[in-house]
Image (cartoon, rainbow, N blue to C red):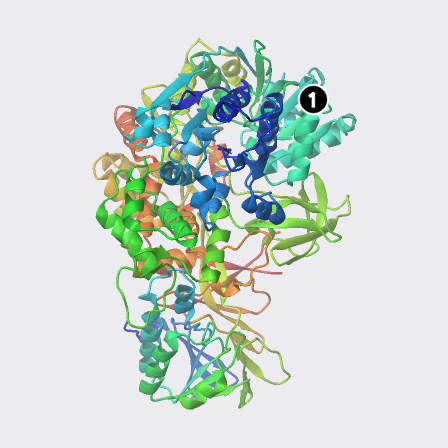
Amino acid sequence: MQGKNGLLNAPTGSGKTYALWLPIVLDYIKKNPDYKEKHKPGLKAIWITPLRALSVEIKQSAERVVNDLGTQMTVGIRSGDTSASERAKQKGKMPDLLVTTPESLQLLLASKGYEKTFKDCSAIVIDEWHELLGTKRGVQTELALSRLKKIAPNMRIWGISATIGNLQQAQEVLLGIDSEAYRNSVLIKAVINKKINVISIIPDKMETYPWRGHMGLHLVDEVAKIIKASRTTLLFTNVRSACEIWFQRLLEKYPEFAGEMAMHHGSINRETRLWVEQAIRDEELKVVVCTSSLDLGVDFAPVETIIQVGGPKGVARFLQRAGRSGHQPGKESTIYFLATHSIELIEASALKKAVENTVVEDRVPYLNSWDVLVQYLNTLAVSDGFFPDEIYEEVKGTFCYQAMTRENWNWILNFIVNGSQSLQAYDEYKKVEIEENGLFKINSRMIAMHHRMQIGTIVSDATLNVKFLGGGFIGTIEEWFISKLNPGDTFTFGGKKLELYRIKNMQVLVRKADPTKKSRLVSWMGGRMALSAQMSELLRQELYRANTDDLSPELKALQPMFQRQRKESIVPSADEFLIETFKTREGFHAIFYPFEGRFVHEALASLLAYRISLLSPISFSLAYNDYGFELLSDQEINMQEVLDNNLFSTDYVHSDLMKSLNATEMARRKFLDIAVIAGLVFTGMPGKMVKTKHLQSGSQLLFEVFRDYEPENLLFQQAYRETFDHQLEEGRLLLALERIANQEIVWKQCKKPTPFSFPIITDRLREKLSSETLAERIKKMTASYMK
Amino acid sequence: MIYNLQMTITIKINNNTFILHPSGSLFWEDRKALLISDVHLGKVSHFRKHGVAIPNNAVSKNFTRLTEVVDYFDPENVVFLGDLFHSSKNSEWNLFVEWSDCCVAEIILIAGNHDIIANENYDKIDVKVFKELEIDGFLLTHHPTKREGLFNFSGHIHPGVSLRGFGGQNIKLPCFFQKENQMILPAFGEFTGKYIMIPEGNDLVYAVTKEEVILIEKRQAER
């Protein structure tokens, strides 16, 4: 470390945890030669980890260093899992080395006298920085660091990041743009050339491969073979619900795995997760079915094999997962790819290319996240209060807020003090108060408490704890799922069949269900990922090869599917843009295939739907996946008119998109996240009884009230900006339109759905866009009556 | 907003005439009484008082809409079917006092679960508060209530309906929900949510858009 700051680029499991704790402890020894007899109390170093599941491992590694060197240093964890009594104890006496999360660090800044706690801290390590970088938790971290730099002037800052495309930028974001800390920093790249084998699981009979996204369960026998042949296997699924299903199915078909098999995902309770992690290390498990919850950190030496179910959507993620196996230096990593439907096999062969050429994505950092800034300033106001001029300089020095103007800043200050930009006579708004000496402070104990509860909610939807009637915590579940169930309904969760007894005080009370009863699988909203730009490019190149003789094993296996596709339509080549239209009993379908990834398709679909809706009144239902998008309507789209009017034009893209956004739900969803972070939605704390029902409002309502009464609100505007930058990726959209402009449009009028279209038209998660009046639409609709 | 007659729907119940209005209010022609439910006044101010910055301008909207609909029907009585105020007294109370001063009609409140403001406050401004009212075989309550021989008007639920159409179309709207001997009014208030009801048998659903009231056609549930 040598008095410098820096970013360490190292793959997971290369002994980096030990490598960074060691100099921290050595530094203490150097400064305190009598370290063996005397112990100097106080916080000396902080380790930030994005996943609290990793904190135990990190603590153990720190303890090893501390004990090996014979110091009397203490190590502690502070996260959402830390008990209230433990936290109180820490408040009195901080451990020397603290392992924590971005949220918990923020909470520390919300406690009185925090400056004293941190003043002698000499180092802070931000682990898995690449995971935080493109998120609001990353912004939260940037802000915390801007404060810590000031109150702990001797603190060195180190980030650890897996390989991403923009490492240099990652370093800049971490340390602050053009900052003293950045100038005194280094970027260290670990050169470890680990060999990664990618193998697609291809069944003998391709005819049985489903056309649409399933769970890949038809390959359960092939998977079992792989599991049996290996010491320990991690089976990764993209979403938690798939994780539950795979666990169930493996156990049903191969009961001999019982006892040697476990499940691990973010909603399962901590004790179980820790037990699973320990059991992997102790080589007690043959297979663990898991989600991204096992992506990071923890070293699992015994893991020999990885199976990835469904497209990983990004090269970096795939490499990360591959890296979970063959952990000892010099060992090869093997990852099996299991495509859940036929087109996904193309992804497999594209991934192989990506691994060969080590193509990795950028993580795009957020800019001007006003919601996080509002939260942060409230945090400072809750603890000791703040003087705006002092904090302005610190905030302005971060990457996220480098372009913030004085006007922006004043707007934010006004917002937290007055709740608006103009004072009104009868208003009783109360949050931050300005004291006589100019200190901004929150004095209301209740508002302070609300704010502290809110800090942890930056990431997720409202969640409820699932508990057995007789006690015993099972895990957490999202509110929207449980709200669809009635008492007596059965659902599968954590591998158990449970019957809903009732919901009370944010707790879902359940009992064991009759095992023969039909149950629903818990689903989670999060985790829908889109193909990265790099991945889409590789995917297109791979697909275009389908019309050549240069076929990978995957493309060869897909021949029957390609034949079906060619019967009704075509497999497009590089110079062709395919459009298919057909009618089913659902309506008139028009499918477009840009192969640009889900996010770009989302943008293209609303753009095109909007432009078509200008030609004549029409209502659309939109669907998209990584390969293309669909416009479904109750009337036939005049495709000739679409082509004649050049509706794929790059002219006025921005303003057209803006208008189409008003018609769809995208900006609404973004606004909800923003509103939660900025404290406009009171969610309460998961598991804590909410006495504030009067303060809860629907997210939909909130969006509408801002749209109708305060559209100029910076937080409201931010929803649109973020939709453009992070959701729609406007830059990529323009490139896609330019590419389409140079392609020949091939419009196929099909008699029935094609294999390419199938996964799209069966997607039920849809956007709406309409240029008909509400009354016109209602008159064509009906309400479903119960029998 | 200026309303015209085509936007409303007129219905007969037990030989009395009622007009359903897009604002979510219902006019009882025979008694010249305007029924309004679940306005939830004071909600925005309540949020703001607790540090949740809902736009301030939203406060005045409820009062503008109340004035518009009272001007339209010119009733002798305005009957609030409960949840007139969202919580305890706050600055919006003063706005309500001003509004009630200007209102020529007699104001009646059937108290709902949210109405925790003490009755003497209402006494002072000549608003009569009842638990329920029975008039000519009609029962006015906050909670939907079944009682032998009476037709019930109520609120509380904030009824909404989910509509579906060809081509993957669907939409959710607030509605008047009519069951046998019962009519549940939608919430009048801005910034109030809705609860989606599934109709059965001979239930009638009148969806409410900002401009129109529309009787919804039924479709038997699949399966």
Q: Compared to A767, does B60 lie above or below?
A: below
Which three-letter amino acid code belongs to the residue tagged 1?
Ala
Give the quarter of the figure containing the C terminus of chain A: bottom right
Q: Nearer the viewer, residue B21 or A236?
A: A236
Give how far across and how far down residue A141 sits, in percent.
Answer: 42, 38
- Chain ID for label 1? A
Which residue lies at the image location 30% right of the left edge and 35% below the top edge? A730
Q: Nearer the viewer, residue A237 or A126?
A: A126
Which residue lies at the image location 52% right of the left edge and 18% below the top edge? A558
Question: Which residue corresponds to mark 1?
Answer: A224
Say few, some or many: other residues with alpha carbon within 10 Å of mark 1 (under 14 / 14 to 19 / 20 or more).
some
A197 with respect to A419 (left or right): right
Quarter of the view holding residue A247: top right
A616 with respect to A545 (left or right): left
Q: Compared to B153, does A495 lie above or below?
A: above
Quarter of the view holding residue A423: bottom left
Residue A634 visible here:
no
Residue A400 visible here:
yes
Spot the residue most to the left: A651
Q: Compared to A282, does A601 lie above or below?
A: below
Q: Compared to B106, does A98 lie above or below?
A: above
Give how far across and how far down residue B152 sits, in percent.
Answer: 55, 80
Give the quarter of the figure containing the N terminus of chain A: top left
Query: Which structural element holds mark 1?
Result: helix
Give how far across and how far down residue B86 sits, in percent.
Answer: 46, 72
| Number of marks present in the image shown | 1
Give how far across and how far down residue A692 sits, in percent.
Answer: 52, 63
Q: Nearer the viewer, residue A528 or A689?
A: A689
